[in-house]
Amino acid sequence: MFSARGDETRVKPLQAADQGGTIDLPVNMRVLTRLLSAFDDSSQSMRALSELTLCDPALALHVLASAGPVAPADSGQAFSMEARVSLLGLDMLHALVYRQIGKQFQGAVAQHPQSALTSIWARSILCAELASGLARGLKKPTAPARLSGLFHLLGQLALLRSRPEIYATVLASGPSPTDLRRAERELFNNTHEAAGAALLETTGLPGFSPDAVRLQHEPLERLIDAPFEVRAVRVASALAVCGLTAETTTTATTLLGIEAPALAQIMQESLAAARANPAGVDIQETAATTTPVAPVQEPPGIVGADLSLQLPARFDEPANQNLVDTVSAFAESGAQWTMRQALAGATDQNGALLRGRRLTRLLTGLGPQVFFVISADGKHLVPALLEGDPRDLDELTVTIERSPSLLARAARDRLPARVTGSALAEGAAIDRSLARMLGTDDLLCLPMIHDSTLAGVTLVALPAEHEEIAESRALLARIAGLTAETMLRAGRRARSDEQLRIELTERFRAAGKRVVHEAGNPLSIVKNYLKLLGDKLADTAQVREEVTILNEELDRVTRIVQRMGDPFAIDIDEPARLDLNSVVHELMTLCRDTLFAKRGIEVMQQLDPQLPLLRADAGAVKQVALNVMTNAAEAMPNGGRLNVMTADNVNLGGELFILLQISDTGSGVAPELMQRMFKAGPTTKGEGHEGIGLAVSASILQRLGGHILCRSSIGRGTIFLILIPRHLHAAEPAGTDTRSPDAAA
């Protein structure tokens, strides 16, 4: 066993849970390059990309941490890595891959020992397939077990990053689990199980994955009633190392109730699946892989040459260093492009900030961030509240010129600014308030600048004991600049859209005023001649009624035309008094001869005499009823029967309505037309019809808070149900009979 000696071999404890996100773990270059190949293949689905992501524990951890906490509904069997990748987005994943390629090469001078990494990557995939196979065999959710198995050696990647040469020596010596944990405590004051579990806890992964990683070497007697994920990973990790032995079979039987024959079948299928992994990660020959299985061919999803990059063993030679610099520069330029693409989809300020926050978390692992943007007067920083931000943030405003705060300093100097520890405790009160809100004592402010224009300031909460890294700060500054670019572009687009809206509004107003002017005179002439015509006709009650109704309709047309003078004005008129039975009576008077009699249509009325007066727009309801009656008449060109009925107290969803029902005995409406009946579009009525009458009616009723429904079938006629909210007129108490005895005639 390896024994640490002296301070030079010791490092401070790894505090994964305090890192504010993922730390930089080594990612398999084979997986990264296969992902790059998949990005260029338009036939590759999100599922294929997620399967590639699941071939590397560090990359999968980045995706989970960056996509954000998992919702309660997205747990258990419902949890899907594909859903996490989709939520993250293709552009973000592309940026992550480029960034990881650059990191692997930039750190290649002190590259982790490849033998140790190769073993960890292979065992992770095999354990993931074994845990998934065990779950499938027992009809349990497979996704959580697979992820838990994939992450079971996550802590070894973290410890290997911290002390690569020494820890690799420990792993190469093949220590027992007990000896390995003892060496890890001496080196790191930690164990790989605890470090891996702590990293997983930062992702919000559902279920018991952290426990499965933390407890994978616990004695069997302590795990008898543990959650299934814990027991599955305990069995799978043992199988991944030792294969099928008497001891591992006993472990499987004790914890999962699986007997030897079934376990052998699961082992064979899992090993075949592991070897067929879509990233082409090699599964090394170990005791676990001695079970005979049929040869497995390369999966058909990835085609072309092997794109894996084999790093030279030594990088201290100039030629090799040049290779590192060249590939790093290429990856950096690719990352820059993909970061811009990942942000470009934002259409407004908040969208840009949300994407910038996600990109920062994805590429740096840093957690809480809030944003302050420049106010309209350019003199203040005001918070841009996003989902998940503290609500109290909205109360804070920073005066750029006079404030002693970190935010104002970053905005004034246009340079990153940081405050921590005692300097924070003695600094501006607003800095301390923000630190409390974000749960940190270390704040970093980055100005968001593009083309010399300051768009705002990003405030990042740094984790405890965060070391200043120039490369990390440069990346944060670059993301802040790209976010500013996206914000300013979205702002220019919004201003352009607003200017276009204003111009169009003015054009409509001008056109409306011309219509009012041109239509006013003919309408006045028609009203005057109608008065003269009324004087010349016999003075009977029917003539007076019809002339009165015509005058009212002309007045309604005049009001409609006048409103066109300002088509965007908000209608602030008080709701009128609506007597629904009177509206029906007026329409029958107007339409009986012109619309129904000439077609031989018989009109039947069944009007409820107890209808109350409503507080509603009578003209609007009249327009709806006229549109429906006109449709009914046109559906019966050779005669038929029109039934009109009104009724009170119709309950729909707990709300009361007044009903106007209009039915005909026409030819009916075809099913394909029923689907778009209340949408404007081509009409089947021929020339002279716009096909918008029912669409307008539906729009009017929606504005009134009502509904229009239709039931129809070919050859059986059509029924329209018009529901008007039962809002009683103020002058009429509920239950009052406001109808005259002859109103329902």
Image: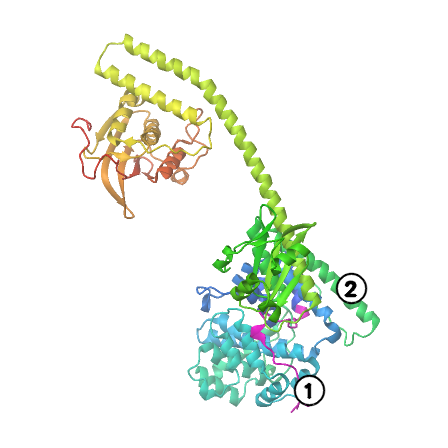
Residue toward you, 503 or 336: 503
**In which quarter of the view is residue 667 placed?**
top left
Q: Mark 2 or mark 1: name the one nearer the start of the chain.
A: 1
Q: Is residue 98 visible?
A: no
Q: Few, some or many C-alpha atoms within 10 Å of disc 1 (few <14, some 14-19, many ≥20)?
A: few
Label 2 element class: helix
Which residue ends up furthest to the right in the rendered image? 318
Q: Which mark is nearer the camera, 2 or 1?
A: 1
Which contiguous range is marked in magenta?
A: 1-30
Residue 630 horizontal side relative to residue 114, left or right: left
Q: Which residue is mark 2?
A: 326
Q: Which residue is mark 1?
A: 7
| Marking on residue 278 | none
Q: Is residue 400 visible?
A: yes
Distance CA(mark 2)–CA(mark 1): 37 Å
**519, above or below 678, in the image:** above
**527, above or below 688, in the image:** above
Looking at the rendered structure, the kind of residue marked 2 is Thr
Which residue ends up furthest to the top in the rendered image? 536
Looking at the rendered structure, the kind of residue marked 1 is Asp
